[in-house]
């Protein structure tokens, strides 16, 4: 049995933020590669605590999934009293999705712990998955974290480009749960993406350490996007130590070093990612930019040529050309570029917003309205949705 919780969320994004792979330059998707036979460096060899002020923030793996007092009260008042012979996992899913219950809203402005997502009644897919797992464990329901294989979505957070993946959760049966005759489904999959085609998903099981490291890596990238490099370092460090197989955490660590001006440690981090994953285009692009900024042009060009062969049109290429055309006053050319970007990445709100701006310059008002509505629909935060809704309402007022 599979249950997407589409009706409980207000947006229809089909690719959702889970792990933020922070990029310093061109954002690139992952590629197939052969694994290096060289021995990886020990995780601690890539850490440089001496470059940053001491950490004064509590970074604890335990608190990420820990239920709050409010969550336990909700369990007692809504979940355990609502069983009446039913499976706890069914009651939990009903509470997550039914009107008048949690009223969850999708919001990717920050990655929340399980208790923070419950208090806010919102979160990205990782936050809402953590919250669901926390509830399930309190009820004694077995949990399976799942990473979904799909085309990654690249977006921008400030001046960073980030690669977004997707996770969801499977809820098992307790050994003591009563089984209805004919119902042999061992796993009930819960997905917080509206319209998710769960039966068609290809998934890989994730261990808890990796999921916790994903949370930490998200927080690192979010702090970095705000310019808080010291905090970003300690969160990326924690993510890398939590799960040294999560190379996106090491890539994030490398970007933190580079932005902090630590060229040697940054190069070491990017090269270690490539030692483990020679086809990792995120770290390849970051290393190329680092080498070019250090005037090591010949080394940089080798990587840049390799990147050009692997991906001649990186993410945001057509979008950036469209923005440049808008600045030159050529809305028609800009419109063509925005449409081209949308053709290969249809679910990023900013592309539709800029298409609306180009259409407005061209007087294509029906398309302006549809593009703004689409931008609102695909927004990943409450703030964005409010902005696009206000622009759409203002346009309607002018027309009428």
Image: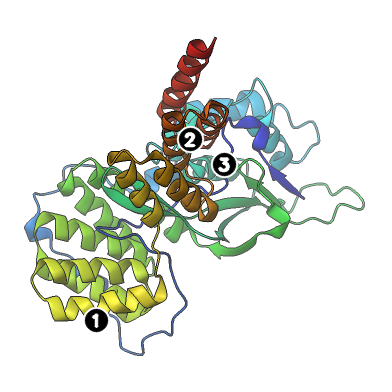
| Residue 69 visible from this viewpoint | no
Does 42 sit above or below residue 218?
below
Callout 1 environment at 10 Å: few (<14), some (14 to 19), or many (20+)?
few
Give me the C-alpha separation between circle 2 and circle 3.
23 Å
**Closer-to-camera residue (15/18):** 15
Identify the residue position indicated by label 3 in the image.
132
Residue at mark 1: 302
The image quarter in which residue 138 lies: top right
N-terminal of the two: label 2 or label 1? 1
List x then y, in percent, for residue 185. Answer: 79, 55
Residue 289, how many percent across, how many down?
20, 66
What residue is at 7 percent from the left and 59 percent from the top? 50
Residue 213 on image: x %, y % = 38, 56
User: Observer-nearest residue: 258 or 46?
Assistant: 258
Q: CA distance from mark 3 to mark 1?
A: 46 Å
Give the camera-side residue of 176 and 106.
106
Q: Determine if residue 238 is in view.
A: yes
Quarter of the image with the C terminus is top right
Does residue 228 sit above or below 101 in this rendering? below
Name the N-terminal-most of marks 3 and 1. Answer: 3
Which of the 4 quarters of the picture holds residue 110? top left
Q: Nearer the viewer, mark 2 or mark 1?
A: 1
Other-residue count near label 2 (Cα within 10 Å), few / some / many at <14 / 14–19 / ≥20: many
Instruction: In the rendered view, tell whether residue 68 sits above or below residue 293.
Output: above
Decide if residue 377 is on the left or right side of residue 189.
left
In the picture provided, is 333 more to the left or to the right than 41?
right
Pointer 2 residue: 379
Comes first in the chain, label 2 or label 3? 3
Instruction: For mark 3, give the secondary structure.
Output: helix
Instruction: State the residue at coordinates (66%, 38%).
Output: 5
Q: Give the structural element (helix, strand or loop) at label 2.
A: loop
Does 372 sit left or right of 198 as displayed? left
């Amino acid at each position: 049995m599979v249950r997407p919780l589409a009706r409980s969320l207000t947006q229809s994004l089909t690719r959702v933020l889970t792990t933020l792979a922070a990029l310093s330059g061109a954002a690139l998707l992952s590629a197939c590669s052969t694994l290096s036979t060289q021995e990886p460096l020990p995780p601690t060899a890539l850490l440089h605590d001496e470059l940053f002020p001491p950490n004064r923030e509590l970074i604890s793996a335990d608190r990420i999934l820990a239920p709050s007092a409010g969550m336990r009260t909700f369990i007692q008042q809504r979940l355990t009293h609502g069983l009446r012979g039913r499976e706890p996992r069914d009651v939990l899913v009903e509470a997550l999705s039914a009107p008048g219950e949690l009223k969850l809203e999708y919001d990717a402005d920050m990655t929340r712990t399980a208790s923070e997502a419950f208090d806010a009644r919102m979160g990205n897919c990782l936050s809402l998955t953590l919250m669901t797992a926390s509830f399930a464990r309190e009820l004694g329901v077995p949990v399976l974290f799942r990473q979904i294989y799909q085309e990654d979505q690249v977006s921008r957070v400030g001046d960073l480009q980030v690669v977004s993946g997707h996770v969801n959760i499977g809820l098992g049966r307790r050994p003591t749960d009563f089984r209805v005759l004919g119902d042999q489904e061992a796993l009930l999959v819960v997905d917080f993406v509206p319209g998710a085609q769960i039966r068609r998903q290809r998934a890989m099981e994730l261990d808890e350490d990796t999921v916790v490291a994903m949370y930490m890596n998200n927080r690192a990238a979010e702090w970095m996007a705000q310019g808080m490099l010291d905090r970003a370092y300690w969160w990326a460090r924690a993510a890398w130590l939590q799960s040294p197989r999560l190379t996106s955490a090491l890539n994030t660590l490398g970007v933190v070093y580079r932005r902090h001006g630590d060229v040697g440690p940054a190069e070491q981090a990017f090269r270690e990612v490539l030692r483990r994953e020679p086809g990792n285009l995120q770290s390849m692009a970051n290393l190329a930019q680092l080498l070019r900024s250090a005037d090591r042009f010949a080394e940089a060009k080798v990587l840049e040529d390799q990147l050009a062969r692997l991906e001649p049109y990186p993410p945001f290429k057509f979008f950036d050309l469209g923005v440049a055309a808008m600045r030159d006053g050529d809305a028609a050319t800009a419109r063509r570029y925005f449409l081209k970007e949308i053709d290969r990445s249809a679910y990023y709100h900013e592309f539709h917003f800029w298409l609306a701006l180009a259409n407005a310059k061209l007087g294509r008002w029906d398309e302006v309205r549809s593009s703004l509505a689409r931008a609102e629909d695909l927004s990943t935060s409450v703030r964005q949705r409010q902005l696009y809704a206000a622009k759409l309402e203002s346009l309607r007022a002018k027309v009428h």
